[in-house]
Image (cartoon, grey):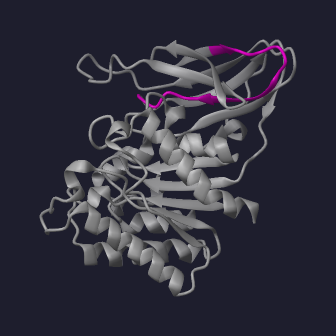
Amino acid sequence: MNWLEPEPFLRGTAWRDGDRPVRADPADLGRLPWDVAERAALPIGVRVEFRAAPGTAAVELRYRAAVPGAGDALRELRHAFALWHDGRCLAEVFAEPAEESVVRLRLPSAGGEFTVHLPEGQAPVVRALRAVDGALSPAPRRPRWLVHGDSITEGWWSTRPAHSWPAAAGRTLGLDPVNLGYAGGARGELPLAEHLARLPGELITLAFGTNCWASVPCSAPLLYETTRAFVGLVRRGHPAVPLLLLSPVLRPAAEHTGNALGATLAELRGAMEEAVRDLVADGDGRLALLPGGGLLTTADLADGLHPNDRGHARIAAAVAGALRPWLRT
């Protein structure tokens, strides 16, 4: 059984730093805030997708990962490799983070197309893969969907990487989602807009703004101009790509509470939405708005801020509905 190079099988990748998939341009990290650069080193949303010939018994992945130290808060986090087929999870295999190890996932005898969602803790890197008693080939490429956002986009409080809203919407639409969500970040950092402009993609979604309420407080006029500038920089690299902006989803503690500059999240959301409407009126016919304020209820939140699995599913359904007309054209 010969080991195969992983590159043709990897999906959800943006840039590479050596053999590591990373989520920001490694040649341009100096212009990013430290927290964004740190989150960009994690392989959020990276998957292995392959076609197995009938009779193939299993797939093996050789990987390396950071080994958590005794005081690491994530030491007890389960390291799950999830096998998906035809929109559902067939099996999960739990392994220990290791400097070098192999995990085996058994396959149905009928073969077909499969996705392995990798664990995201300890930054695993797939080194090689191979078939057991059969043959593998890379899955067909799908349209590449760039999804920029914050911890909600990154998938916080979804119980599995496959349950985050970008992953779920990508499955629904048959897209290859590239998760560019940065927990604590996505505050309208303009260098990230330039990164997006340089990254190939067939669709783009921007879902930022909630961290502009407190992490780096914005006023409504500032966020209006930041939104216009961010979209303008993305458009320099993608002048005709369909672009959807999802404004901030429900955050009860912030909706009607002023931040350090006196702006409520409702006012910030309104400023972003106004910026999109004005850009469309100025002639950007490939730009669309999905207002986020009404998508969730408090029952869809795990901690008052991040969606639970049901919340992620509701965002995924709304985003898929907003993107579907672009896919038809």
Q: Does the magenta stretch include residue 120?
A: yes
Q: Is residue 2 magenta?
A: no
The segment highlighted magenta reads 104-121
Coordinates of residue 120 in the picture (x, y in percent): 46, 31
**Which residue is at the far bottom?**
282
Figure check: 217 above or below 176: below
For residue 325, side relative to residue 167 (left or right): right
Q: Above or below — where is 4 with respect to 314? A: above
Give the side of residue 311 with respect to residue 131, left or right: left
Q: Name the residue located 25 percent from the left edge and 49 percent from the top edge.
A: 252
Q: Which of 65 and 209 is in front in this view?
A: 209
Residue pushed farthest right?
54
Which one is in front, 103 or 82? 82
Image quadrant where one finds the C terminus: bottom right
Counting from the top left corner in percent of width and height, residue 89 is at: 62, 23
What is the quadrant of residue 256 in the picture?
bottom left
